[in-house]
Image (cartoon, coloured by chain):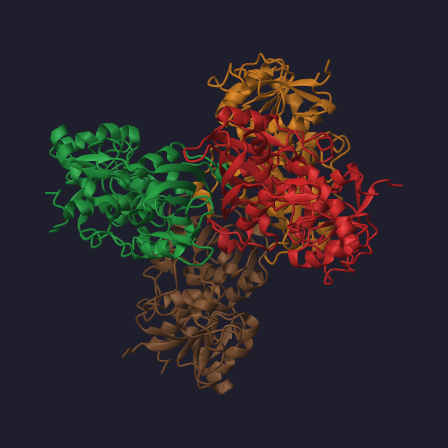
Chain colours: A orange, B brown, C green, D red
């Protein structure tokens, strides 16, 4: 008999839901116990209702599972939510209310004062907000969220630079992969041999979530970091992997060498770095002039590391660099699973 | 008998050389009289030595022309140079010395104090440097250069904004087309489904040339504009058309509406706007959120207009916008041809 | 006052509808008088309801036109139909019944015994079926159809080879452009860096329509050609232009040289070759080993010519060759317009 | 101390050489003992001379290895050859002459009467030619070759069909990935949004090698199979994975169901199926209409299985189907490694 923790996936048939299925196939702590999706799919085998868009097939055994409706009666203790924001807004609290630990990838509750927005290597201490959440909502369960895919890949390298040099200003231009738009997502007629210089809502999320993730929780109250972010979001013809060109301003201007050293030395805090999905190096620094590249670097450390390159000084602010991270692994399903592992390790899953 | 001005193309077999051939096929003032290329190609028919990479075939009559060596004995008054920089460095002065008007697309002589770097709509008055050039070099001919493809698409919209609001700071991230790298250029294994966050030499050119183009010529002496430029250059999987995401800082902060009005109203100066290759509107402003796009917008006004969109305020500097321009038309062959037309109109071609 | 024939476009907002709009902007005989589309769009300006996916903008004046419903009360004599098959099935006869000349690009009525399926260079004489159509249906108007985009590009070169050598067998493998699937059509997640070896219904259409187009009309009765066609249809990551690899078997085996001569010499019949949209050479033969290519060749002669290459013998049948043609110009809107021109020239539009 | 067999890689810096390096990093039987390449690279660390084009980095320890010259003094018993054909023609016999077991991926010696051309699941018995080779050449070592990447993916499914129904005719159209052209290989300007309907030498190899692989070795003499192959080879914008559309003619016409059963049941012979690199199922059959697809299926079973789909009858011959296989795994490095494993298992490596 398995002693792994039974988990459920809400929105299991979408692109992020499929990533959850794939990543949890051989997870040492978690076991997929139920797949839930909208009315249209419920009651039918997963293989019949899921347009599996990843290589190969769903993991063995999963295709035959009967999809459940989005109701809090799943045989699971943790549920991962890959729901659209509007549905997540309604459904996630129902699960928390009925005692489930909800690890959400949706944006619906990210900005609530009592809902932690977590990247374990960056702000694991923000879990302290859960006490306030439980007190305020009277929930036996809880909701923890993970940030937008682009913000994730940006904030991980910003964290150690902020700690060392005091981050003040961020110019960010993104070149984002099509898998970030879901399925069917971007029409091929729009993106083939083209750039679309707009990703709805993305720039606002990058501004807001960066301030939250780098902010502080003191006495159960979260304050935003005082960082000004200016973002340009673009969609490019890349399958997986978001690239971000960054120019950064600090309280104390680092040299490129100092920045590289700080980025290279960064590790998650004790209690995070040994989690099953945690990369050994959350940040990999490359020194070749033409790296990082999404196709070659987004899969580093199982898609959970952020690769940084072209670290050099900036004539306008202090530092320029380029980051590449995997938008549906570190930036979506993998990030939420790491959050769940953290919650287990910290005793929130009983 | 034709009364058009006979012209020559130096480096006629390369990608930019081919664009010259294509654009000059039906030119009202110019007639292709000779095609010159390296030793390897000289003496053979153009069709045999040119790997024509554009749609269809070379224009009628051109394929049969015998390629000349790169020597100043061409039956032409104007020569367009699409030579690699190192060769241009040697060859272009030989032509000027022998009386040819050299309109160069190469970077070799762009930064010489007495060589005009010209975009007719931006700084036609810099042609005044020619007097100094002729005096200093004792040439009966002359050399005029056009800027790098990326800089061209950026500086055209910067010009009216500078005039109206006093440009001080430029943060630029490019998403550049593969045709900018020539042929064979970027290997498909490097760019398919990928981004390469580096274009050799491009960032330096963008910094330097912007300062030159927006600078002033007073008493035959050129001073650089006092603009700080920070650039990130990327190569993306686009055939033609460079996209640039810009954040700009000014002496006087414009609203988005003011900036749009200034950009929309911009026309080339009298004496430029009626040149055969001049676009009616050097700048087109689009208001849809997801434009400009390289595949849909780079061909505007025969590839000679720059399309601007997403004009909005910037939380760090003053203004954000996105530009798209055609890198081998406005940004290369078309730009040089417009320069040549300006020289004819101003009486420099006799 | 214009003396051009007023025309209407049914399904004007889709990808083929947009091509009709583009091609008819400067047509010497036709003038766009009305744009019709589904209920959802009717009553609103074209620019507001049409997601214009082609380069640039709709032609001047068209964006402001108010879209009409799909009812036979348009101020037009000819209507071009770019409707989905199911809607075309209902709507097109209503227009014919009310006196309109319907030139349809839809598949709905292609296979009716009394509806001509026409490529003017191939089987203009099939227009004789119109007499039977008018007699049978008691319509003052008429319906003429153009074939599927893939079939069009294949049958044009098959025609002269059939005439010269007696075509018996066709092996065809297609590599089709994404624009053939309409908008939004193929999801970018499905086609990016991929091949989809299936195009719904395409293989059946290629078989059936080839037999009809190469068949004969005798005494108002159409007999299918006795040609066996085996087809593999694939979708590839190309914007415009279908490529087809063909192996052909004949009654009399031609040499490659004989086949090239027959293809090169092919012209449309008198009465067709001078129509405004007719290409001078319906077939262009290229001798380079790596041509034709869709990006470089599909625009030949305004997108109305089929380019053929790699003509060589076949070890299994008699002859191998590769064709490239433009799927939304010659293969859709351009083909229907050429049909309409033929109808005008033959006196069917009064 | 390792007891794995020391191996060398000839041509270690190219694209196929890199695949050998990658696949052998954790091989249970083999250990990379030396990397050899041309004069230009010899004597320098692998990381310095190899432009690593695959995701991430070379395996640990490999980057520091000093590249050897292409001389038969490597500390290895088996050498894998990823050399260009002209160099392989000279170098491989030198190694065989000096006692090395040469497993070659090059075409240089594939067609010699006494050199086995092997796919273990297809014709392992052809190893009998080695006796003749050793006798004739007086070599203590030997040369065994693996076929062209395209032929490999085609012949594996042809084998069981041939056995069951007697293969006579093959009509094959390929859609080949760019990685098959090596690095830099195809220029991005040639393949972006395009199809190149020509792959130099490929069609001839498909014809010849199919006949050899399906032929028989009787008393040390190899006879070619009596199969007529007609091939069209195309390059498409796919990174990895060759797609082939096949129409097949047999002595006895199978139904689609019979063919599917034969393909599904196929296993390598005893002595092959348990080799470390052998896939459990050399052939995977998919029943969905739009599979196989290169991006989703070429990695099946570690890139060593061929995926077959769209099995259906053919109106001209008997059967149509589509295959996808990985061109640099099963079709190159992986195939040669499987050959080496077979040689070890059969006692040829002492």
Q: As displayed, is residue A231 above or below residue C205? A: below
**Quadrant containing the C terminus of chain D in the rendered view:** top right
Percent of width and height locating residue D156: 60, 36
Percent of width and height locating residue B350: 36, 83
Percent of width and height locating residue C2: 13, 51
Q: As displayed, is residue B331 above or below residue D188? A: below
User: What residue is rendered at 51% in x and 43% in y?
Assistant: D229
| Residue D162 visible in the shown view | yes
Question: Outermost residue, front direction?
Answer: D219
Judged left or right of residue C110, residue D49 is: right
Which of the two residues, B25 or B237, is positioned nearer the viewer here?
B25
Judged left or right of residue D29, residue C158 is: left
Quarter location, residue C167:
top left
User: What residue is rendered at 45% in x and 39% in y?
Assistant: C234
| Residue B255 visible in the shown view | no
Which of the two residues, A119 or C88, is positioned nearer the viewer here?
C88
Q: As displayed, is residue A292 above or below residue A63? A: below
Judged left or right of residue B260, residue B150 is: right
Which of the two residues, C9 or B297, is positioned nearer the viewer here?
C9
Question: Outermost residue, bottom direction?
Answer: B138
Judged left or right of residue C178, residue B91 is: right
**Quadrant containing the N terminus of chain D in the rendered view:** top right
Quarter location, residue B153:
bottom left
User: What residue is rendered at 39% in x and 35% in y?
Assistant: C203
């Amino acid at each position: 008999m398995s002693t792994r923790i039974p988990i459920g996936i809400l929105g299991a048939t979408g692109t992020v839901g499929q990533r959850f299925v794939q990543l949890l196939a051989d997870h040492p702590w978690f076991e997929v116990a139920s797949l839930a999706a909208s009315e249209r799919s419920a009651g039918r085998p997963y293989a019949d209702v899921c347009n599996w868009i990843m290589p190969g097939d769903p993991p063995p055994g999963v295709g035959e599972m009967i999809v459940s409706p989005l109701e809090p009666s799943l045989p699971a203790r943790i549920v991962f939510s890959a729901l659209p924001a509007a549905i997540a807004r309604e459904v996630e609290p129902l699960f928390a209310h009925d005692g489930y630990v909800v690890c959400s990838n949706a944006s619906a509750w990210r900005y609530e004062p009592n809902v932690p927005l977590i990247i374990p290597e960056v702000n694991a201490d923000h879990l302290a907000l859960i006490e306030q959440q439980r007190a305020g909502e009277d929930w036996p369960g809880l909701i923890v969220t993970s940030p937008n895919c682009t913000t994730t890949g940006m904030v991980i390298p910003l964290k150690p630079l902020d700690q060392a040099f005091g981050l003040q200003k961020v110019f960010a231009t993104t070149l984002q992969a099509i898998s970030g738009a879901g399925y069917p997502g971007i029409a091929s007629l729009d993106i083939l041999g083209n750039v679309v210089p707009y990703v709805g809502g993305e720039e606002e999320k990058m501004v807001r979530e960066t301030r939250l993730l780098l902010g502080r929780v003191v006495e159960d109250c979260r304050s935003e970091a005082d960082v000004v972010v200016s973002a340009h979001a673009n969609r490019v013809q890349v399958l997986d992997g978001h690239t971000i060109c960054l120019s950064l301003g600090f309280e104390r201007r680092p040299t490129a060498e100092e920045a590289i050293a700080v980025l290279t030395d960064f590790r998650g805090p004790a209690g995070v770095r040994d989690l099953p999905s945690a990369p050994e190096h959350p940040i990999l620094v490359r020194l070749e002039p033409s790296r990082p590249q999404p196709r070659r670097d987004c899969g580093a450390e199982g898609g959970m590391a952020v690769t940084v390159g072209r670290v050099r000084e900036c004539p306008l602010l202090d530092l320029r660099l380029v980051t590449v991270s995997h938008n549906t692994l570190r930036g979506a399903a993998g990030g939420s699973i790491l959050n769940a592992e953290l919650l287990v390790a910290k005793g929130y899953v009983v």
